[in-house]
Amino acid sequence: MINIKSIFANASDDDGFRILVEPVWPKRAPHGKTVIWLRYLTPSLELYNRFARDMISWEDFIIQYHRELNQERKSLRDLQVYSRNGGLTLLYGSGKADHNTAVALKMFFEKDPDWIGYGVDSDFSKRKILAANYAFFKKRQIGQ
């Protein structure tokens, strides 16, 4: 199962493998041994800064971040093991609970047929937002 949580939220037993997916460590965030920072999962610093400063839209951020992730596809397969065995929690540090790197990464996993059925939480509380963003992404991808 893949969960999304703020790095400032308390850890729980059902979090499983906790991964920070921000390119910079958030200010005042705890440095604990329960958090792993996998920088190859984060967007490039340039892309992240452009999104954080509202220079690009959420939809454009998703498209560009997913392009970057496609270059790391082989490394992402290792995360399936954690997703299947004990869970996976993607941690974000921004103040936006519905538009952050963790949500965009989970969307990437959800659109990948190799990930479907391997613990992706179909009852994700932001399902409607993700569905709308995913539909937009697909239209942009096929050039409609």
Image (cartoon, helix red, strand yellow):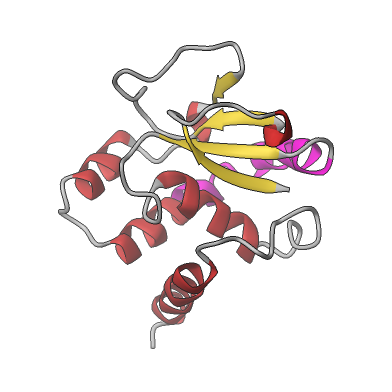
Quadrant of image for the C terminus: bottom left
Q: Is residue 48 left or right of residue 17?
A: left
Task: State whether residue 111 is above or below residue 12.
Answer: below
Q: Which x, y percent locates residue 35?
A: 56, 21
Most distant residue in the bottom direction: 144
Question: Is 16 part of what is drawn in magenta?
Answer: no
Q: Which x, y percent locates residue 122?
A: 69, 65
Q: Is residue 85 left or right of residue 52?
A: right
Q: Residue at x 71, y 56 (%)?
A: 120
Q: Residue at x 54, y 68 (%)?
A: 127
Closer to the camera in the image, 26 or 113? 26
Most distant residue in the right direction: 85
Magenta: main secondary structure: helix
Question: Is 81 part of what is drawn in magenta?
Answer: yes
- Write down the quadrant of residue 108 in the picture: bottom right
Task: State whether residue 2 is above or below residue 11.
Answer: below
Magenta-colored span: 68-84
Q: Which x, y percent locates residue 126?
A: 50, 63
Q: Residue at x 55, y 62 (%)?
A: 125
- Write down the quadrant of residue 13 in the picture: top right
Q: Is residue 50 left or right of residue 14?
A: left
Q: Which x, y percent locates residue 134?
A: 48, 72
Task: State whether residue 134 is above or below residue 35.
Answer: below
Task: State whether residue 136 is above or below residue 19.
Answer: below
Q: Residue at x 76, y 35 (%)?
A: 82
- Write down the quadrant of residue 116 in the picture: bottom right
